[in-house]
């Protein structure tokens, strides 16, 4: 008749609920008092924890009383179990929204000890039987509640029914029996109302059978929680649920032993084994608490990842990993307002990433489960905002630096151009005029003599000077063609075309371009035309310059053989061209399909 | 012959004046800019003015501008523009703005006494002169590959002299041919190149230059 599945063996009792509340109230006082009186959060919480543990230890030790003599091991394990659960509850209590399961856990531990109050004899065995299942009710409560903000209607009904069944059912057994029937002594106080052994036996089977059904139901409810849990929830509750199911099964095993023996002969080691198995529950809660702390620590790695990559996509995937939410979305605030509104109405968790009072830099839309992990979620949001802002600032700095480099390259090109023009002018106005005047004077001198040898000598000298002049002119032209300065790109290209052995058509809008642009296009065209002469075997070349509002495009296209590998065209000259064009933020492309001629294209942004 | 000079470089200006004097020409004015020249010759225009193409203030094509202005003021004064640029564009430009008695010479060739005097007298007489170096370059370009098969060697010679600004008579003298033969060659060249005969010498030079600069005959 003492076969129980869920409850502890009959004969264990407990104090009234007033004790529970007194404990809670005292603990709260110690907590708050510690905060108020002592400097430093760590210090105060340690003090409060120590006080609570001492009080619980004394209370439980006294409640167990004579059990220490009967089975020191069982008493010690019970006490340890209670203390570990209280400690776990205190840790759990620090997490937002977890004070209910925390208190339920602490009460589970305390009531486990109170279960063994029957060792004091007197009225306690009767109380122990009636309230012997209360620790199980609290345990089930903690397991079903953690870490949700509230119980579901089904869970709440289950707990109420369980409590009612445990207490009312056992009370019925007690009032229809006598102490000796329960394996106790006649000296126990026993509230018999109607002693009927066969009725008591039937009631006992019905009550314990019902408790068995409640046990199976609890396993089903816990398994359902595990199946339904997502993301962070699943990580946190898995150890707790698994330990809970294990504890229910362990209790069933103890119960099975007890059904095979009478209360008097039920060995204490059976209870001992079950108590030891029950340690899985506080351990699982501790694991869960540590898991939550680890998740928050992972947020720091999120910073590193997001900072390294910097773009919104990388941050999104980092957030998905860290928060274990594959549905998480990270959106630019510009296109987010409507999406965010829809998401909010669909029950999703919407959070804006922003620094202080600045405008939001991104919007996060996440699984509402994460609302229960405010600490984790808020830390991830703060970190993300920081990382994103940092990345944006870095990108801005890089852009500005690039802009500076561009400006500086353009300035170098401008300076080089100015220097070339100055050199050309110096050659023209200085050395060239000087040589020319010497040549003129030589000619004048030649008119003064009729001596044939003198005339021949003057003539040789003058021819030599003319050769030097021609070389000088070529040199000056190579440094910078004066016609480019004076008449612009079209005229300069026409002069280049004059010297080429094949017809060159030039199509270009009238008017001047910037000096740097003209010089760059001129050098590109010269290089391209020289390559046409060298490689293309072409009959003609077309040089086209087109200006749109934002681009200036030049194309040098021949009707030659094409198929010139990019490396052959230009060589070092091309690299030089690409550099010059690059300095103006432009680009050079070469297209040379076999048999279709070669096209060199330059695009330079303008305006 | 009375000559006025506008030349920016003092050294070359004085050397040129020295050369002209030694060749028997009278240098009436030698100044560094076109505006000064226009002012200086207003009272007594010379037979020919020699203008540097690059002068103050902008050092680009002041010579051509001054030539344009001068032609309006003194239609009978010959104009010889000197340049260090062997670029046909300026020559064409000059012939656009001045219709006759005009020449474009490279400074290198100015120092050749014979060439200088011949150019001065042709310009003074209302003829046209284009520096042979410029014509040679244009011809070298167009001869290959386009013109070889179309004109024979004699016709190419005639074309060259036409481009340099010579009259039929001048060409006949240069090539030791009769004027009639030259006329035949000239009309043959014009026909073969698809050009129309021009009424004036200047227009003929312009047409030939334009043809040579345009890329030659299309195949």
Image (spheres, coloured by chain):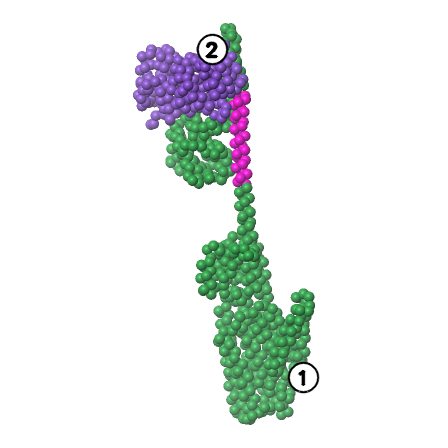
Chain colours: A green, B purple
Tell me the number on the disc at residue A578: none
Same chain for the residues under marks 1 and 2 in the image: no
The chain to which mark 2 is attached is: B
Q: Is residue A417 above or below residue A585?
A: above
Who is closer to the viewer here, A452 or A484?
A484
- Disc 1 packing (10 Å; few <14; some 14–19; many ≥20): some
Front residue (pair A341, A477): A341
Secondary structure beneath disc 2?
Answer: loop
Q: Is residue B216 visible?
A: yes
Q: Residue at x 59, y 63 (%)?
A: A294
Q: Residue A23, how many percent across, how many down?
A: 63, 77
Q: Is residue A135 above or below residue A361?
A: below
Question: Residue drawn 61% across and 86% down?
Answer: A125
The quarter holding residue A136 reads bottom right
Q: Name the residue that disc number 2 marks.
A: B25
Closest to the camera, between mark 1 and mark 2, is: 2
Instruction: Name the quadrant of the N terminus of chain A.
Output: bottom right
Q: Magenta span has A422?
A: yes
State the residue position of label 1: A66
Is residue A462 in view?
no
> Farthest residue in the bottom direction?
A195
- At horizontal 52% and vertical 83% (from top left) the residue drawn is A165
- Do the CB atoms of the residues marked 1 and 2 lie less than 8 Å apart? no
Query: Residue A145 appears at what percent x and percent y?
Result: 54, 73
Q: Which residues are magenta?
A: A405-432
| Residue B106 in the image, given as x and y percentages of width and height | 46, 19
Residue A606 drawn at (x, y percent): 46, 39
Lateral position of residue A290 relative to residue A443, left or right: right
Residue density around tag 2, few if under 14, some if 14–19, many if 20 or more, within 10 Å: some
């Amino acid at each position: 008749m003492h076969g129980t599945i869920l409850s502890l063996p009959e004969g264990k009792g407990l104090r009234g609920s007033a004790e529970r509340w007194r404990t809670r109230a005292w603990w709260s006082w110690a907590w708050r008092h510690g905060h108020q009186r002592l400097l430093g959060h760590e210090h105060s919480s340690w003090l409060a924890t120590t006080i609570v543990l001492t009080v619980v230890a004394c209370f439980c030790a006294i409640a167990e009383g004579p059990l220490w003599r009967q089975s020191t091991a069982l008493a010690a394990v019970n006490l340890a179990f209670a203390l570990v659960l209280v400690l776990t509850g205190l840790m759990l209590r620090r997490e937002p929204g977890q004070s209910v399961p925390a208190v339920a856990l602490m009460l589970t531990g305390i009531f486990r000890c109170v279960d063994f109050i029957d060792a004091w004899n007197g009225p306690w065995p009767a109380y122990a039987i009636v309230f012997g299942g209360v620790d199980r009710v609290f345990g089930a409560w903690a397991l079903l509640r953690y870490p949700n903000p509230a119980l579901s209607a089904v869970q709440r009904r289950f707990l109420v029914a369980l409590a009612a069944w445990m207490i009312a059912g056992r009370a019925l057994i007690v009032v229809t029996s006598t102490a000796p029937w329960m394996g106790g002594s006649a000296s126990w106080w026993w509230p018999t109302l109607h002693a009927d052994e066969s009725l008591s036996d039937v009631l006992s089977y019905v009550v314990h059978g019902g408790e068995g059904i409640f046990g199976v139901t609890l396993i089903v409810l816990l398994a359902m929680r595990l199946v339904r849990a997502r993301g962070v929830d699943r990580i946190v509750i898995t150890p707790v649920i698994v330990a809970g199911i294990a504890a229910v099964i362990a209790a069933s095993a103890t119960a099975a032993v007890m059904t095979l023996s009478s209360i008097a002969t039920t060995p204490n080691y059976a209870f001992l084994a079950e108590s030891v198995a029950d340690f899985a529950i506080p351990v699982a809660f501790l694991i869960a608490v540590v898991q939550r702390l680890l998740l928050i620590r992972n947020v720091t790695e999120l910073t590193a990842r997001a900072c390294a990559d910097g773009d919104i996509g990388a941050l999104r995937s980092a957030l998905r990993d860290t928060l274990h939410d594959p549905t998480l979305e990270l959106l630019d605030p510009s296109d987010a307002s409507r999406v965010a509104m829809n998401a909010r109405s669909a029950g999703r968790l919407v959070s804006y990433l922003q620094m202080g009072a600045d405008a939001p830099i991104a919007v996060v839309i996440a699984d509402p489960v994460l609302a229960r992990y405010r600490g984790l979620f808020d830390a991830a949001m703060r970190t993300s905002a920081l990382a994103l802002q940092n990345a944006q600032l870095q990108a801005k700095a890089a852009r500005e630096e690039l802009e500076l480099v561009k400006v500086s390259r353009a300035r170098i090109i401008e300076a080089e151009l100015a220097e070339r023009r100055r050199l050309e002018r110096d050659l023209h106005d200085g050395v060239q005029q000087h040589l020319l005047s010497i040549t003129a004077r030589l000619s004048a001198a030649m008119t003064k003599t009729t001596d044939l040898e003198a005339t021949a000598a003057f003539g040789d000298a003058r021819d030599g000077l003319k050769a030097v002049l021609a070389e000088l002119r070529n040199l000056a032209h190579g440094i910078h063609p004066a016609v480019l300065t004076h008449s612009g790109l079209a005229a300069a290209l026409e002069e280049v075309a004059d010297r080429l052995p094949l017809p060159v058509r030039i199509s270009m809008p009238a008017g001047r371009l910037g000096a740097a642009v003209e010089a760059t296009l001129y050098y590109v065209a010269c290089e391209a035309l020289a390559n046409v002469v060298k490689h293309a075997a072409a009959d003609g070349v077309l040089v086209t310059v087109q200006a749109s509002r934002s681009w200036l495009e030049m194309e040098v296209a021949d009707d030659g053989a094409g198929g010139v590998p990019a490396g052959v065209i230009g060589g070092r000259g091309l690299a030089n061209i690409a550099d010059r064009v690059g300095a103006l933020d432009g680009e050079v492309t070469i297209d040379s399909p076999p048999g279709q001629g070669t096209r060199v294209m330059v695009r330079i942004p303008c305006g | 012959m009375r000559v006025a000079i506008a030349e920016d470089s003092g050294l070359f200006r004085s050397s040129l004046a020295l050369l002209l004097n030694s060749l028997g020409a009278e240098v009436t004015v030698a100044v560094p800019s076109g505006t000064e020249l226009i002012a200086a010759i207003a009272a007594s225009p010379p037979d020919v003015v020699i203008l540097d193409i690059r002068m103050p203030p902008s050092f680009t094509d002041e010579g051509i501008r001054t030539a344009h202005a001068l032609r309006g003021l003194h239609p009978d004064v010959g104009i010889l523009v000197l340049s260090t640029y062997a670029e046909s564009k300026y020559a064409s430009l000059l012939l656009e703005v001045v219709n006759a008695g005009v020449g474009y010479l490279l400074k290198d060739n100015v120092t050749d006494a014979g060439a200088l005097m011949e150019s001065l007298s042709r310009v003074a007489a209302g003829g046209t002169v284009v520096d042979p170096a410029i014509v040679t370059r244009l011809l070298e370009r167009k001869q290959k590959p386009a013109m070889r098969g179309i004109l024979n060697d004699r016709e190419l010679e005639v074309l060259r002299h036409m481009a340099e600004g010579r009259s039929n008579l001048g060409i006949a003298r240069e090539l030791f041919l009769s004027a009639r033969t030259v006329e035949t060659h000239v009309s043959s060249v014009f026909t073969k190149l698809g050009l129309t005969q021009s009424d004036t010498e200047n227009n003929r030079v312009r047409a030939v230059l334009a043809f040579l600069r345009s890329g030659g005959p299309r195949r």
